[in-house]
Amino acid sequence: MRSVRVNLRLGCVASACVAVAVALTLGACGNLIGDACGLSTDCSPEGGRICDTAPSSNEGYCTIRGCDFGTCPEEAVCVRFFPVSQLMRDCDGPDDCTLDETCSTGKCAPRASEVRYCMLACSGHGDCRGGYECRNDARAQLHGGEPVPDPLGDASVATAFCASAGECRTDDDCATSLGDTCDGDARFCAPSSF
């Protein structure tokens, strides 16, 4: 009788260990920032990430909204966006804008309209999935988005990020000044290399 109780206890302990391991494994599942998705649960079962399914997000984009400098996962950078309709006059720096505006990608934008997302960091277009570009400073000037600046002014922090390359019908819909062309089959701009 004693050996049955010992075996039963060991069996329960082993079952509990397996259950804990499965729970930890499932809790660790979730796509990386920038991965394709259809639902937010595709990105994080526990709700820490969302799936951006805006039309500009080709096949969805796993992200975290409301980030700040240094708060994104290691594969990502926090990027601020301003609605195009909110971009005001041209600027070369913060002194060209009012106190309630910021100079972003060469335009004054109301600070209150800023939206931040964790975006996959990259060093070239090959780091991004199909339909996306590695958006450096030159591309950000044309397409928007800007990494949240380091409050300590460290310029060595990653500044390029993967973002939608944009839909197109002809080459004129793409950043031809940067050598981009329209991939007619995919209907997305094919970025030139950098």
Image: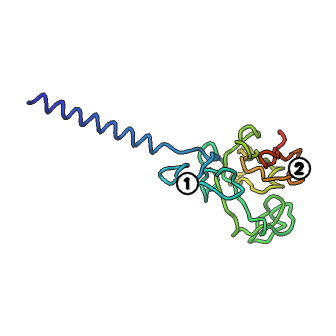
Amino acid under label 2? Asp
Amino acid under label 1? Ser
**C-alpha separation, residue under disc 1 versus residue under disc 2:** 33 Å
Establish if 75 lies above or below 109.
Answer: above
Q: Secondary structure at mark 1?
A: helix
Q: Which quarter of the figure is the C terminus placed in?
A: top right
Task: From the image, tell me which residue sits under label 2.
Answer: 171
x, y (%) of residue 131?
Answer: 74, 46
Q: Which quarter of the figure is the N terminus placed in?
A: top left
Residue at 84 percent across and 41 percent down: it is: 192
Q: Residue furthest top?
A: 3
Task: From the image, tell me which residue sits under label 1.
Answer: 40
Between discs 1 and 2, the one toward the N terminus: 1
Q: Residue furthest left?
A: 1
Q: Secondary structure at mark 2?
A: helix
Choose top left, top right, bottom left or bottom right for residue 102.
Answer: bottom right
Choose top left, top right, bottom left or bottom right for residue 106.
Answer: bottom right
What coloring was used for the rendering? rainbow
Establish if 8 lies above or below 69.
Answer: above
x, y (%) of residue 4?
Answer: 13, 30
